[in-house]
Image: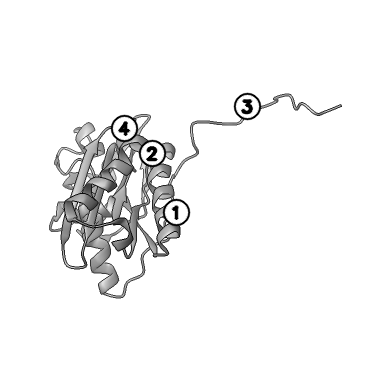
Amino acid sequence: LALDTATPAVTVALHDGTDVIASSSQVDARRHGELLLPAVDRVLAEAGLRLDAVTGVVAGIGPGPYTGLRVGLMTADTFGLALGVPVHGVCTLDGLAYAADLEGPFVVATDARRKEVYWARYADSRTRLTDPAVDRPADIAERVAGLPAVGAGALLYPDTFPKAHEPEHVSAAALACLAAEKLAAGEELPAPRPLYLRRPDAQVPKNYKVVTPK
């Protein structure tokens, strides 16, 4: 079972070890928590399986916004604990790169809001060259100049990414296929822990009064 909520897409897929057998993707940046579990039910029903048939979980670890990313990762951890199965992480940018299936160097960029992008450079669809980062598009223009780019972040900023094209959002189907390939090859996948890259918007107020009982 693969799932990702690091982008506006709420995406879920089932992989049988050979291929994807069911998938679902909906784009709604404000309803990750509402849409994810029904999507899991939907792909299980499409495949004619029960949840207890799942032998492993793959979750997109971002980078992504704090709230959306937590929904997917907490759900994946909960499934892993309830079913007693391993939970693996896959970088969301890696899933987009895999789905793009491009030859030669390229860039993946997702929308980080605040007029910034989460991004990384790739040698090919399975080889990331740089760690995921968050930057303003204009600040990385020289580093990505002339390279093809995929993802919603690239499509939003054509001045920086003039060769941008789809896929716009990650798909759990791509995450599942990538994870299956890596596991079959004996590669280790990262722990299912979030790549936030910056602090959450919500902050504890400074100089607040502490109320203590008398």
Tell us which disc is closer to us: 3 or 1: 1
Give the residue at mark 2.
68
Q: Are marks 2 and 3 in contact (CB under 8 Å)?
A: no
Q: Which residue is mark 4?
A: 29
Whether residues under marks 2 and 4 lie with C-beta atoms below 8 angstroms apart, the answer is: yes
- Report, in whole angstroms, how far the alpha carbon at label 2 lies from the one at label 4: 8 Å
Earlier sequence position, callout 2 versus callout 4? 4
Nearest the eye: 207 or 90: 90
Q: Nearer the viewer, mark 4 or mark 3?
A: 4
Residue that badge 1 annotates: 193
Question: Horizontally, is 145 left or right of 115 in the view?
Answer: left
User: What amino acid type should be assigned to the residue bearing mark 1?
Assistant: Arg
Position of the C terminus, as image quadrant, is top right
Q: How is the image coloured?
A: one colour
Locate residue 88, reporting x and y percent: 37, 61
- Asked if residue 154 can be seen in this view, the reply is yes
Amino acid at circle 3: Pro
Seen from the viewer's position, the closer of residues 18 and 44 is 44
Q: Amino acid at mark 2?
A: Gly
Task: Tell me the crowding category of disc 1: few under 14, some 14 to 19, or many 20 or more residues within 10 angstroms, Cα based.
Answer: some
In the rendered structure, find residue 205 and report the number of the disc placed on it.
3
For marks 4 and 1, the one nearer the N-term is: 4
Which circle's residue, 4 or 3, is located before the other in the chain? 4
SS label for mark 1: loop
Q: Can you see residue 96? A: no
Q: In the image, what residue occupies the spot 26% across and 73% down?
A: 184
For the residues labelled 2 and 3, the Cα–Cα distance comes to: 23 Å
Mark before the other along the chain sequence, 2 or 3? 2
Q: Indicate whether 58 appears above or below 31.
A: below
